[in-house]
Amino acid sequence: MSEESYVWGTGRRKCAIAEVRLMPGDGDIIVNEKPYQEAFTRPEYRRMIEHPFVATDTVGKFRVRAKVHGGGLTGQAEAIRHGIARALSKENELFKPVLRKEGLLTRDARVKERKKYGLKRARKAPQYTKR
């Protein structure tokens, strides 16, 4: 693959980190050297990844190469979406207000809460016994 000019964006969600490259092209999306339909079999994940293109009306105008690691499938799909949105806003400043309105540029900061000692999970305590 010839290295041409591209715009990049880093997307994050939960523990997943996606490095996304956006190039002018025919609209194919490759995730970890696989087509995204192969990597994400559930339709909602595919819709999630395509959302920035649908919002900016640029479906089929860019080629995407994404490397993603960490987290599960939901976190990875949302990290790729975040990365694509950031790259699109770098590509064209006019996309920024549209993507911001859709909530695609805001990093979802919710992460798993750590377990505390004396508890079973982050907040679940053992059952209290009076006697």
Image (cartoon, rainbow, N blue to C red):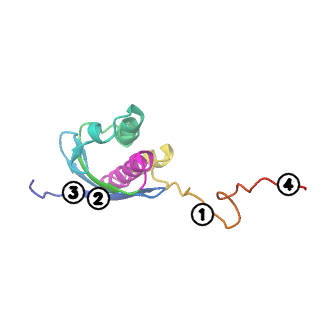
Q: Nearer the viewer, mark 4 or mark 3?
A: 4
User: Is 41 in front, or is 98?
Assistant: 41
Instruction: Give, as a single range, the part of the protein colored magenta.
Output: 71-95
The amino acid at mark 1 is: Arg
Numbered disc 2: secondary structure: strand
The amino acid at mark 2 is: Trp
Q: Is residue 90 magenta?
A: yes
Separation of residues labelled 3 and 1 (CA atoms): 38 Å
Q: Nearer the viewer, mark 4 or mark 1?
A: 4
Q: Is residue 100 magenta?
A: no
Mark 4: give few (<14), some (14-19) or many (20+) Cα within 10 Å.
Answer: few
Numbered disc 1: secondary structure: loop
The amino acid at mark 4 is: Thr
Pointer 2 or 4: first along the chain? 2
Q: Nearer the viewer, mark 1 or mark 2?
A: 1
The residue singled out by tag 3 in the image is 6
Question: Which quadrant holds residue 38?
Answer: top left
For the residues labelled 4 and 3, say whether their Cβ atoms are less than 8 Å apart. Answer: no
Separation of residues labelled 4 and 1 (CA atoms): 25 Å
The residue singled out by tag 4 in the image is 129
User: Is 80 in front, or is 8?
Assistant: 80
Q: Is residue 23 left or right of residue 12?
A: left
Residue 114, disc: 1
The residue singled out by tag 2 in the image is 8
Pointer 3 or 1: first along the chain? 3
Separation of residues labelled 3 and 2 (CA atoms): 7 Å
Pointer 4 or 3: first along the chain? 3
Residue 79 pos. (x, y %): 40, 52
The amino acid at mark 3 is: Tyr
